[in-house]
Image: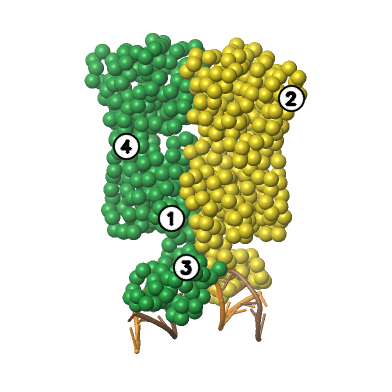
Chain colours: A green, B yellow, C orange, D brown
Amino acid sequence: MKTIRDVAKIAGVSPATVSRVLNNKGYVSEEKKNRIEKVIREVGFEPNQVARGLAKKTSKTIALLVSDITNPFFPELAKGAEHIAHSNGFSLLLENTKGVDQEGTDYIKLLKNKYIDGVIVATHDIDKYLLETNTGIPMVVLEMENGIENTCTIKVDNFHGAMLATQHLLDVGCKKIAHIYGPLYDQTAYERLQGYQQAIRMHDDLSEITVAGDFTIEGGQSAVSQILKDYPDVDGLFAGNDLMAVGVIKELSRLKIRVPEDIAVCGFDGIYLTRIFSPEITTIEQPIYEMGELAAEKLIERINNPYINQEIIELKTKLVVRESTSKSLM
Amino acid sequence: MKTIRDVAKIAGVSPATVSRVLNNKGYVSEEKKNRIEKVIREVGFEPNQVARGLAKKTSKTIALLVSDITNPFFPELAKGAEHIAHSNGFSLLLENTKGVDQEGTDYIKLLKNKYIDGVIVATHDIDKYLLETNTGIPMVVLEMENGIENTCTIKVDNFHGAMLATQHLLDVGCKKIAHIYGPLYDQTAYERLQGYQQAIRMHDDLSEITVAGDFTIEGGQSAVSQILKDYPDVDGLFAGNDLMAVGVIKELSRLKIRVPEDIAVCGFDGIYLTRIFSPEITTIEQPIYEMGELAAEKLIERINNPYINQEIIELKTKLVVRESTSKSLM
DNA sequence: CTGAAAGCGCTTACAG
DNA sequence: CTGAAAGCGCTTACAG
């Protein structure tokens, strides 16, 4: 491996001058600049990122904290984030936080010891406030917050989306609609529940039916029997996320209840699975890949300018109608 | 942030001695050792990984190269790899190789410039031989090779698995079984095709029906019409991977052909999707998560001892029978 | 057993 | 505009 000293020697200049052209900062004569660039190309020199990192306290890498990469929401997000990271010369460190290190102290250490330049937090497993105050590292938080000092929060209009979902079920003729909500410490789950309730309350002849789920397939499955026990005449189910919608449909299929003829089902998130499942699942779609890209963009913006204040970005969701609610198409 | 000098000063020793206890190498008196460890704990000292990296030419991170993390095979693999990486103090860098940088020169640069300690290659998008010869970095290759000098290859017995799948379709009463194979530059696809052919040839009354697919859902979908055009009486389909099996079932459902009553379907891989799809999909299961773990273990073994020779590990697959072939259960 | 010194490969005031 | 020097925070022969 060539070093900056090798380049300097060949070009007949000092390492400092080479460094200047590498970083495009400080004055350097056109003539030397050309000479140095030529040598760099000829010997195939690439600056050592670790050495540079030590000197500049940077690593050109950002971390993505997700609870569990096997949850299909996250690969899409990760791909979007990685795309933008790469186009800006950053690498992406992947961390699964589920089941590890409650307080996040290990992550704090990691981020600091490796000079990680920024972090995208898409998990509830660790304390974001602690992370922020203890590292001072630029941060973008996804999907789950009311905003944290010095960070950018990216979320979607869960409330509105949930209203859309509920209204859609009414539109296709459902008379009795239940909602399976996610864990309420998750802001997302809470807002969606509120949206459902609001939509129901706008109609005097409807009443709320809600049951707790946990955002997993199994949660969706077991919620079904609970609902049917008390409300055997339910004809519409709005699941708080797509994974639960999948569970719901599986369970209904097991019970020989037809979707959407007997019960129409709508999910939330827009993970790829809703498109390939059979029946294809109606859902409130979030722009997941784009959220990943935006998160990385905002993060890099903050890395380049640490003095940006708190910021909250709310993205639009949209209803995507598919087989699981297409009664009229049957 | 405290440095090793701060610790040394407080403990009344030299930085070199602190370094010795940090690395647990070289002699240091019990008394000083205790004193130093106490100070380290008290001030909460953590060695700076970047500085250490520069001195030792290491980064305590391994890279995982996958073609596309949104392909459901890879998150499971990544999770397994990350688990082992973390328990050994390594971080995981994630790289999606699809559509970027054909020759892999960018990756070569990245790996060298950041002192990446090792790399798990689970993609066809870049030239592994080039990678090996140009970086000299420890490498584990997945699923796709006959072995490369100085690397560990982990694969499954695709041939045997494909025979199992085909035989299983025969066992449940199929008389006319077609195989949709993946792209043949993929060793995996080739071996599975061979396994299918071998199983068919063992029966005089059967003949081979094969059609090319591309390991995607869409590929599975379009293969169905091709097969049905020429062989309308097909009653068993063995898809070269699970994604194609999903496509096959979706297309059959669209054509109102029942699975498994009219046509039984078997996939290959054992991705999580086969368990949650409806109908649940019979498949030849690979231990994906465990492969991720094993890859990381083998890699770390090689990082710690660079003189390990070429190695090929073949794991067993197993048949998992589910609804898509359960004719008798209907 | 221990410390001073040099080195890992860069960057960045500083002086000229 | 340019170079010598010091520094980023560790590690590792080397001498004692």
Quarter assignment of residue B272: top right
- Provide residue A152's location: percent of width, then percent of height: 32, 48
The answer to whether dots 3 and 1 both sit on one chain is yes
Spatial distance from mark 2 to mark 3, Cα to Cα? 58 Å
Q: Nearer the viewer, residue B67 or B86?
A: B67
Q: Residue at x 36, y 42 (%)?
A: A291
Q: Amino acid at mark 3?
A: Arg
Q: Amino acid at mark 2?
A: Arg
Of pointers 3 and 1, the one earlier in the residue sequence? 3
Q: Residue at x 44, y 39 (%)?
A: A76
Q: Is residue A21 left or right of residue D14?
A: left
Q: Disc 4 designates what residue?
A: A156
Of pointers 4 and 1, the one earlier in the residue sequence? 1
Spatial distance from mark 1 to mark 2, Cα to Cα? 52 Å
Q: Disc 1 designates what residue?
A: A90
Q: Is residue B158 left or right of residue B65?
A: right
Q: Amino acid at mark 4?
A: Val
Label 4 CA crowd tier, 10 Å (few <14, some 14–19, many 20+)? many
Spatial distance from mark 2 to mark 4, Cα to Cα? 56 Å
The chain letter under disc 4 is A
Q: Disc 2 designates what residue?
A: B201
